[in-house]
Image (tube, helix red, strand yellow):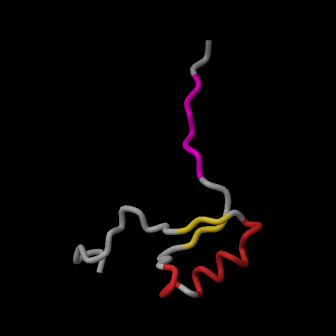
Amino acid sequence: MATADRLSTAQPVTRAFPLERMEEACDVFARTADTGALEVVLGEPSREAVAVSAA
């Protein structure tokens, strides 16, 4: 479906949960027809690395 442009791959992660909310994340993914969750991610949000110049 993605190759036929029928499914957007720009934002595949639809829900993100911290590890301590794993049970809720599993419930959301199990009820994907109701929640619309396509991909559920567990863990801390990723952060971009910032380059620091030496003074």
- Asked whether 4 falls inside the magenta stretch, the response is no
In this view, which residue lies farthest toward the right? Answer: 20
Q: Is residue 50 above or below residue 12?
A: above
Percent x, y for residue 53?
57, 20
The segment highlighted magenta reads: 46-52
Q: Is residue 11 above or below residue 52?
A: below
Q: Residue at x 36, y 67 (%)?
A: 9
Task: Please give left or right for residue 45 compared with residue 3 in the image.
Answer: right
Q: Nearer the viewer, residue 34 or 15?
A: 34
Q: Quadrant of the C terminus?
A: top right
Q: Nearer the viewer, residue 49 or 6?
A: 6
Q: Considering the whole magenta stretch, tell me its main secondary structure.
A: loop
Q: Quadrant of residue 12?
A: bottom left
In this view, which residue lies farthest toward the left? Answer: 4
In this view, which residue lies farthest toward the top? Answer: 55
Q: Residue at x 47, y 79 (%)?
A: 36
Percent x, y for residue 15?
55, 68
Task: Please give left or right for residue 26 compared with residue 13 in the image.
Answer: right
Q: Quadrant of residue 48?
A: top right
- Asked whether 50 falls inside the magenta stretch, the response is yes
Percent x, y for residue 38?
47, 77
Task: Please give left or right for residue 25 compared with residue 15 in the image.
Answer: right
Q: Is residue 1 above or below residue 21?
A: below
Q: Quadrant of the N terminus?
A: bottom left
Q: Residue at x 60, y 80 (%)?
A: 28
Task: Please give left or right for residue 29 compared with residue 1 in the image.
Answer: right
Percent x, y for residue 23?
73, 78
Q: Residue at x 57, y 39 (%)?
A: 49
